[in-house]
Image (cartoon, rainbow, N blue to C red):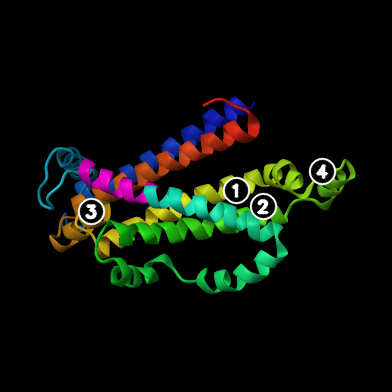
Amino acid sequence: MEKKDSVRYKLVSAASFLFILAVWYLVTAVLKAVPPKLLPSPLTVLKTFIAKLYQTKPDGATLLQHLAASLQIALGGYLIGISLGIPTGIFMAWNKTADRFIRPLFDLIRPIPGLAWIPVMIILFGIGILSRMMIIVLGAFTASLINAYSGIRQTKAVHLWVGRTFGASNMQLLFRVAIPTSLPMILTGLRVALGGSWSALVAAEMLASSRGLGFMIQQSRGLLRPDIIISGMIAIGVVGAFLTWLLTRLEHVLLKGGRW
């Protein structure tokens, strides 16, 4: 039954994708209701996407070079952010003193969107890799901290009571009861942090960068090249979906004992 549902889901997803392509092609290539300078046809975008894989014009780098630059910063900042956010969230949820000390400051910083930090980071670190990476670190740190904190706080009291009844220490309760039961929330935080990091990086590259997918899109906007803009958007979406799929598979392996 599950296999049939999976096949049905894939077929419906493919059908929706093909429907959007068909409407896009009909509006742009057949009816020509929209000028090509505003919205090129899918075939034009496909040709541009393929050409951009080996051509550096008009922004000085190929699509793969822009993608490599974006991934380097996004994954680096993401790993640093979750490495700091998850332990901090666990520590805050498990230690009341730490929660009272850190939470007011965190609640003050949390509502600030990542884009608002861009001018601050440019002033502190200049227009370079470090300023963009710090924006990613902040976004990943926030998302992973919130989910780790929520996961630990949702640990059932009865589980902790059973552990104490059998003589478990406070650290044993944390590592053998609280963290394992909060793992689904922590993994969800990883996915949320990844999506936020990827989006924030592209936005940061539009304002302060000399290479990357966001830079490519921004340059193409100034040159009135919507075909390159859409090609960059497709690359962002495909890579983001692939990274999310990797984390979903990791969650499946860790929580359900499945295989890759």
Distance of label 1 from label 2 (alpha carbons): 7 Å
Q: Sequence-wise, which precedes: disc 3 or disc 4?
A: 4
Residue contact at pointers 1 and 2, CB within 8 angstroms: yes
Residue located beneath label 2 in the image: 151
Q: Sequence-wise, which precedes: disc 1 or disc 2?
A: 2
* Tag in front: 3 or 4: 4
Q: Amino acid at mark 3?
A: Ile
| Number of numbered discs | 4
Does the stretch in magenta take in 73? yes
| Residue stretch rendered in magenta on the structure | 64-75
Residue 229 numbered mark, or none: 3
On the rendered structure, is 258 left or right of 16? right
Q: Is residue 10 visible?
A: yes
Q: Amino acid at mark 1?
A: Ile
Distance of label 3 from label 1 (alpha carbons): 34 Å
On the rendered structure, is 214 left or right of 114? left
Q: Sequence-wise, which precedes: disc 3 or disc 1?
A: 1
Q: State the SS at label 3.
A: helix
Residue 168 numbered mark, or none: 4
Disc 3 packing (10 Å; few <14; some 14–19; many ≥20): many
Residue located beneath label 1 in the image: 186
* Tag in front: 3 or 2: 2
On the rendered structure, is 115 left or right of 109? left
Residue contact at pointers 2 and 4, CB within 8 angstroms: no
The correct choice, above or below, for 113 with respect to 177 in the image is below
